[in-house]
Image (tube, coloured by chain):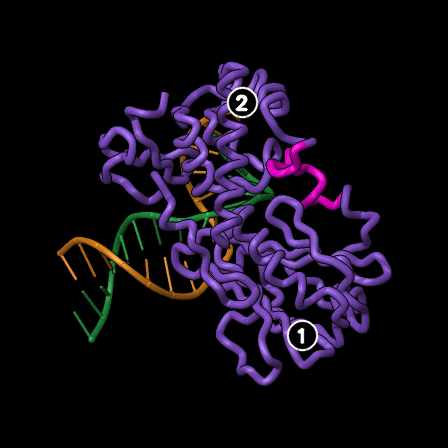
Chain colours: A purple, B orange, C green
Amino acid sequence: MPELPEVETVRRSLLPHLVGQRIVNVHVRQPKLRWPVSTEALKSGVENRRILDIRRRAKYLLLDVEDNVVVAIHLGMSGRLSLVQKDRTFAKHDHVIFHLDNQMQLRFHDPRRFGSIDSFFRQQEVVHPRLAHLGLEPLDPHAFGEDALYTQTRGKKKPIKNFLMDATELVGVGNIYACEALYAAQIHPNTVSGRLSRARCGRLAEAVVSTLSQAIEQGGTTLRDFADGEGNSGYFAVRLQVYGRTGRACGVCQGLIRRVVHAGRSTFYCPKCQH
DNA sequence: ATATTCCCCTGGAAGC
DNA sequence: TGCTTCCAGGGGAATA
C-alpha cells in the first residue's frame, strides 16, 4: 500500500492530533508483525510520555516521544494507522493500540502483517539495522537531484526500475511511483542505471520529485484500502498514467501500456514513449 | 554486484 | 455457491 506519499499523508494527518498527547498505555494484541514487536521495550519506552513530533524517514513514520524515545512504524503493504474514539470496538487485525490521554486511540491495523513497530532511543536511530542502510531521501533537495542521481547510478548495472525501488539507493519509491516516474521521464524501465546520461538523470530526478509531490498533494494513492489517519482516501489513483493499466492506451501516443516483471514486481510502461 | 526466487501474511478478484 | 488460482502498495534473506 504505502509508498512515500502515503506515509507522508498519514504523517501530516496525524501531526495535529498527536503532538502534545500523552500515551497512557500501549496494548499489543498481536506482536507477530514483520519483526516481533518487543512489547516490554515499547511499553517502557512510551508509556506516560508525550508525543513531541512525528517525522518520516523513507517509508517509516518516526514518533518522537519524550526522553529521546523513537517509535518507528512501517506500514508494509496493508498497514493503516487511525485515530479513533476509545470506545470503538476492535476490528480484526487491529494489532497495536496506543491509548492517549484525550480519550482517543491510535490504532495500528495490518491484515498482512508486513508492517513493523520498533522503539529505540534517538541516539540509536542512525545505527538501527532497519534505518542505517537507507539511501537518498528524494524530497530533500539537499540530498537528491540530478547530481545525486547521476553520481549514485554510476557503475550500477541494474535496471533503473530496480534502482528506483532499491531502498539502499533511494528511499520511498515503491512500485507505483517507480513506474509513474519512469513514464514521466520517458525512460525505459530496463535501462542500465549507470548508462543514464546526466541529462536523463536530471529528467528522472525531476520526474521522481514531481510525481511524489503531486501524489502528496492528492493525499496519496488509494487503490484498495489506503486511508490517512482520519480515514480519508487519497486521490492520486485517477492520475496514474501507467500503473495497473495493462493494455490500455497511453495518454500521449495511444500505444498500449505493457506489463513486464522486474524482481518479481509488475512494471507498467509505454513501449513507444519510454526508451 | 546483481538477478531471481521465495518468504513473511490476508483477502479480493477472476476463472471455472 | 463454491473452489482454485493469481495478484497485491514492502522488503529481507537465501540462492545462483
The percent coordinates of residue A17 (x first, y second) are: 66, 68
- Which circle's residue, 2 or 1, is located before the other in the chain? 1
Q: Is residue A76 magenta?
A: no
Task: Determine the residue positioned at 64% across, 33% down.
Answer: A136
Mark 2 vs mark 1: in front: 2
Task: Determine the residue positioned at 76% across, 58% down.
Answer: A64
Residue A135 in sight here? no
Q: Is residue A108 left or right of residue A91?
A: right
Point out the stretch of residues depicted in magenta.
A127-141
Q: Give the main secondary structure of the magenta stretch.
A: loop
What's the residue type where badge 2 is placed? Gly
The percent coordinates of residue A203 (x first, y second) are: 49, 24
Res A191 → quadrant: top left
The percent coordinates of residue C2 (x first, y second) are: 23, 71
What's the residue type where badge 1 is placed? His
In depth, the one of A106 and A239 nearer the eye is: A239
Q: CA distance from mark 2 to mark 1?
A: 47 Å
- In the picture of the structure, the residue carrying the numbered disc 2 is A202
Q: Is residue A11 above or below residue A136?
A: below
Check disc 2 and report its element: helix, strand or loop: helix
The percent coordinates of residue A9 (x first, y second) are: 56, 55
Q: Residue furthest bottom?
A: A87
Check disc 1 and report its element: helix, strand or loop: strand
